[in-house]
Image: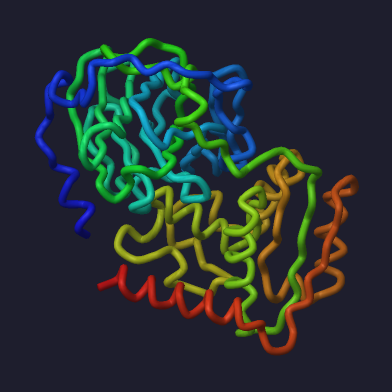
Amino acid sequence: RDALRHLDTPIQPLHAMVSSSRDETGPSLSYEVGLNALDATLDVIASSGRVSSLSQGLFRHLRSAIRANTGAKAGRYYFEVEVLERIPEAPALLLAGFSTDRSSLFLGSQLTCVGFDSKGSSCATMRPAGELGQAKRVGLLLDQEVKDGSVSVFLDGEQVGSTAIPHLCGKALFPTVTFQNVTLAVDFNTPGPERCRAFGSILEEHHARSSVQAAPKEVIIPVALPHSGLYDWSLRWREVRPDFVEIGDDMMADWSALSCLSSRQDPSRAAGSRDDPHMACLGIEQLRSREVWRGALMDLAKSSRQSLIHSSVRRNLVEAERRSLLKNFPMAKKIAVVLFGKPDEDFRDWVKQRTRSDYEAAK
């Protein structure tokens, strides 16, 4: 809550935000800064700086997101997002900003991210998609040289907003885009305001590389009895191995909630259970039938290069269900993890810490 108080910081003129007039020099990176297709939602299509997502059927209603392969932990760096096309008569959304490595891709969902919408408003909380702003280009300037750090937003080259980021200053922050029903061009080489660098020319001493890197595809099937911590184990595994993406009914419920498709007041899994969420109440035709959205999710998983973990108690326990699932991934390495017996001390400490953190966040 303390961090949110800084989101209404008055706009500071650019000359007041510059801590030093000197131009820093040093070696640049040996690789190209760009979008990381492996650090994205399963429906994202990214190539040569252009990014879009599936927009038919169920995916018309879901948000998509992608993060860059490089973050900045110091200095002043700028990147731009341009709207190339939007799907007619569909809710549209563009949020651009920064997030920490291994955090949520959905801007506005956690305090580990900061961003602005296409109208220049800060996205401190989740809001339903609607109309885009009139600007074609949204620019973001990350300044980690000023006290507390700041992020400024530019619409068609004009600065319209700024926010302090004391809770994120000094951390490696990665350009992140959350969007819906639009095609975008993300430019890391556009020159920004005076005395700042384009993100694509970040100095080696200022950069941090994404922990999500290419690796041979794996599919993990954790097997556990009800109420024995399968979902906690899955979450911890993905924190340790951010190159893994969860698939399953609980993941679809989370994706729907992060797309503001929940009952608008309560989380989407308020009805049903994590193993069997009831999503017909969301009013989306494609979510009324499990077979429809399970099939759509599996089609994405089959075509994805990302490693996967299938989280489900009942489906992972039943041999026929496991066999049916694994037939979809003939070329991937398949791993079964059996979760029986008393968890180790590290896992129990992790669960206690997470429970404590969730309690503090809910205060």
Residue 327 in the image: state x and y as whole percent: 87, 54
Residue 144 in the image: state x and y as whole percent: 31, 34
* Number of numbered tags placed on the structure image: 0
Q: Residue 44 occupies which quadrant of the picture?
A: top right
Q: Check the image and report above or below for 88 versus 54.
A: above
Q: Nearer the viewer, residue 74 or 163?
A: 74
Which residue appears at 76% of the width and 44% of the height? 302
Q: Residue 157 occupies which quadrant of the picture?
A: top left
Q: Is residue 157 visible?
A: yes
Q: Is residue 179 visible?
A: no
Which residue appears at 29% of the width and 27% of the height? 118
Q: Nearer the viewer, residue 21 or 155?
A: 21
Which residue appears at 48% of the width and 30% of the height? 205
Q: Check the image and report above or below for 231 versus 163.
A: below
- Give left or right: position of 340 versus 107: right
Q: Nearer the viewer, residue 123 or 76?
A: 76
Q: Residue 155 occupies which quadrant of the picture?
A: top left
- What kind of colouring is applied to the model shown? rainbow
Q: Check the image and report above or below for 75 versus 298.
A: above
